[in-house]
Amino acid sequence: MKKTLFALALAGSFVLGMNGLPLYAQMGPPMQQGMGGMQRRGMDPEYQLKHLTLVLDLTPEQQAQIKPILEERVQKMQEVWRDNSLTRAQRRDKMMALREESKTKIEAVLNDKQKEKYDKLYKMQTERMQQRWQNRGMPQPQ
């Protein structure tokens, strides 16, 4: 009886697993493939602009001003990512500096209400990054 139940459970899990394969195949490869390929959804300037537009209710004029800032940041981050002479900590510090630089430029385009929302968003993202660093055993930036 136990063998029969085990066989049924095993067959059921196999069938359920196989049913998920077509869906996974349709989804394609994961978005997060490293900075080199820039296929990370969060690193795509278009995606970032859409997200900021939704969260901050950006006007078309603001979008036109912010888009080049995001594109420049991604370009510079790619250069830092590809610089093999940097240690992991140096790379992280440079990325954080680029992030802070673009934050200042973006805030110059925003009104007071948008700046307040952007600050909250920025702090949440910073906390998530710090949590990831802790999970990887990396020292926190100064």
Image (cartoon, rainbow, N blue to C red):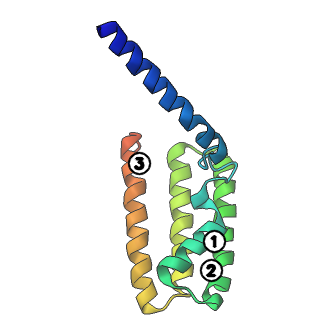
Amino acid tagged 1 = Leu
Residue under label 3, please give it. Answer: 132
- Disc 1 and disc 3 in contact, CB within 8 angstroms: no
* Residue 47 on image: x %, y %: 61, 67
Label disc, if present, on residue 70 of the rendered structure:
1
* Residue 116 on image: x %, y %: 39, 83
Name the residue rendered at 34%, 7% in the picture. Answer: 3
- Please state, as top left, top right, bottom left or bottom right, where the C terminus lies in the image: bottom left
Image side of residue 52 versus residue 67, left or right: left
- Disc 2 and disc 1 in contact, CB within 8 angstroms: yes
Name the residue rendered at 41%, 47% in the picture. Answer: 133
**Hey, which quadrant is residue 117 in on the image?**
bottom left
Query: Label 1: how many residues lie within 10 Å, few (<14), some (14-19) or many (20+)?
Result: many
Between 105 and 13, the one nearer to me in the picture: 13
Name the residue rendered at 53%, 76% in the picture. Answer: 52
Query: Label 2: how many residues lie within 10 Å, few (<14), some (14-19) or many (20+)?
Result: many
Say whether disc 1 or disc 3 marks the residue closer to the N-terminus.
Answer: 1
Q: CA distance from mark 3 to mark 2?
A: 27 Å
- Please state, as top left, top right, bottom left or bottom right, where the N terminus lies in the image: top left
Residue under label 2, please give it. Answer: 66
Amino acid tagged 2 = Ile
Q: CA distance from mark 2 to mark 1?
A: 6 Å
Q: Secondary structure at mark 3?
A: helix
Image side of residue 101 versus residue 36, left or right: left
Name the residue rendered at 43%, 70% in the picture. Answer: 122
Q: Secondary structure at mark 2?
A: helix
